[in-house]
Amino acid sequence: MDHAPLSPATRLRMNILFAPADLNDAEVLLVEECGRNLCWNECATPESLERVRFAALKLSEGQLDLLCDAVLLAQTDWRDLLMCAGFACRLDEHLKWMP
């Protein structure tokens, strides 16, 4: 499967949240497990994945174990992840979030 890289906005938020030692693991999780592999996202771009990836980052609070949990939720049903992060009601709500 072709993986969608992180958008600059996703990378910015990830860099703010995670310790330098955890950045590579966080990026691998988002790129390989929270992207085009999600249902209805097979042709997604880095920018179109921002809503889901921002939600995973928000729920992670900068902790890899919580990011793993958020990614697992996205894989089960990414709409539930959006609900938990508060990004479900408006398509642009995630753009207002900055850690």
Image (spheres, rainbow, N blue to C red):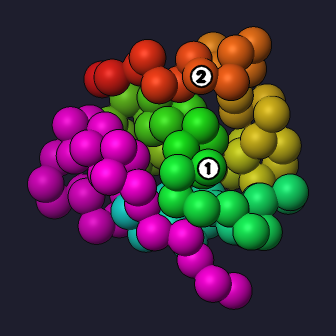
Q: Quadrant of residue 9?
A: top left
- Tell me where residue 14 appears, x and y as whole percent: 31, 45
Tell me, for residue 48, which label it has, or none.
Answer: 1
Residue sitting at x 58%, y 77%? 3
Q: Quadrant of residue 51?
A: top right
User: Horizontal placement of 38 versus 48: left or right?
Assistant: right
Residues at marks 1 and 2 touching, judged by CB atoms closer than 8 Å: no
Residue 16 inside the magenta-drawn segment? yes
User: Horizontal placement of 33 versus 46: left or right?
Assistant: right
Q: Please identify the residue farthest to the left as the structure is shown.
A: 20
Residue sitting at x 70%, y 32%? 81
Q: Earlier in the sequence, mark 1 or mark 2?
A: 1
What range of the chain is rendered magenta? 1-26
How far apart in space, not on screen, are marks 1 and 2 (Cα)? 11 Å
Q: Secondary structure at mark 2?
A: loop
> Can you identify the residue that label 2 sits on?
92
Which amino acid type is marked by label 1? Ser
Which amino acid type is marked by label 2? Asp
User: Horizontal placement of 87 versus 30: left or right?
Assistant: right
- Tell me where residue 67 appears, x and y as whole percent: 49, 45
- Tell me where residue 47 appears, x and y as whole percent: 52, 51
